[in-house]
Amino acid sequence: MIRDNPGRPVPEGTLKEDSEIVTTNSYIELVVKSNRTVFSMTAAIVVAYDFSKILELEEELKVVGNNMKSLEISEQEVSSVLRCHTCTWLMDG
């Protein structure tokens, strides 16, 4: 009978051979590395998506800003025209 670390007996045939343990450990390491790679790639995709979304929103913000400037200029022009017409109307009346 073989004993494990705490000293309890372990029935024969339940322990894996060293080569099986190495193979299992290698497999586990490979899975962990693979998962890290997938996680890293996923994180990179998320970052790239977020960055592209930020650029897209910046572009939209520029368009909105330009539209607001155009509206302000139009409002000033209309106000100026109305002042002129009001002055003309008051002078004529």
Image (spheres, rainbow, N blue to C red):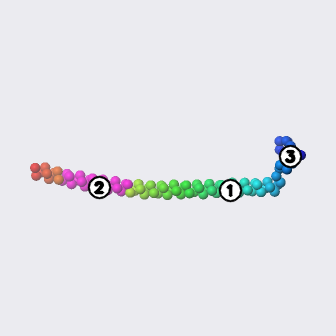
In the picture provided, is 51 more to the left or to the right than 13? left
Does 4 appear in magenta? no
Tell me residue 55's x, y (percent).
47, 57
Horizontal side of 71 relative to 91 (left or right) equals: right
Of circles 1 and 3, the one toward us is 3
In which quarter of the view is residue 61 placed? bottom left
Q: Does residue 68 show up magenta in the picture?
A: yes
Q: Amino acid at mark 3?
A: Pro
Which residue sits at x=10%, y=52%? 92
Residue holding disc 3: 11
The range drawn in magenta is: 64-84
Mark 1 and mark 3 lie on one chain; the one further toward the N terminus is 3
Q: Main secondary structure of the magenta part?
A: helix
Going by the picture, which residue comes out furthest to the right?
1
**Point 64% across, 57% down: residue:** 37
Disc on the earlier residue, 2 or 3: 3
Circle 3 packing at 10 Å, graded few (<14), some (14-19), many (20+), is few
Q: Residues within 10 Å of mark 1 (few under 14, many from 20)?
A: few
| Residue on which the image places disc 2 | 73
Select label 2 or label 1 by which is in front: 1
**Distance between the alpha carbons at the discs numbered 1 and 3:** 33 Å
Identify the residue at image location x=48%, y=55%.
Answer: 53
Residue 33's mark?
1
Residue 2 in the image: state x and y as whole percent: 87, 46
Give the amino acid type for the residue marked by disc 2 in the picture: Ile
Q: Quadrant of residue 34?
A: bottom right
Kind of residue sitting beneath label 1: Lys
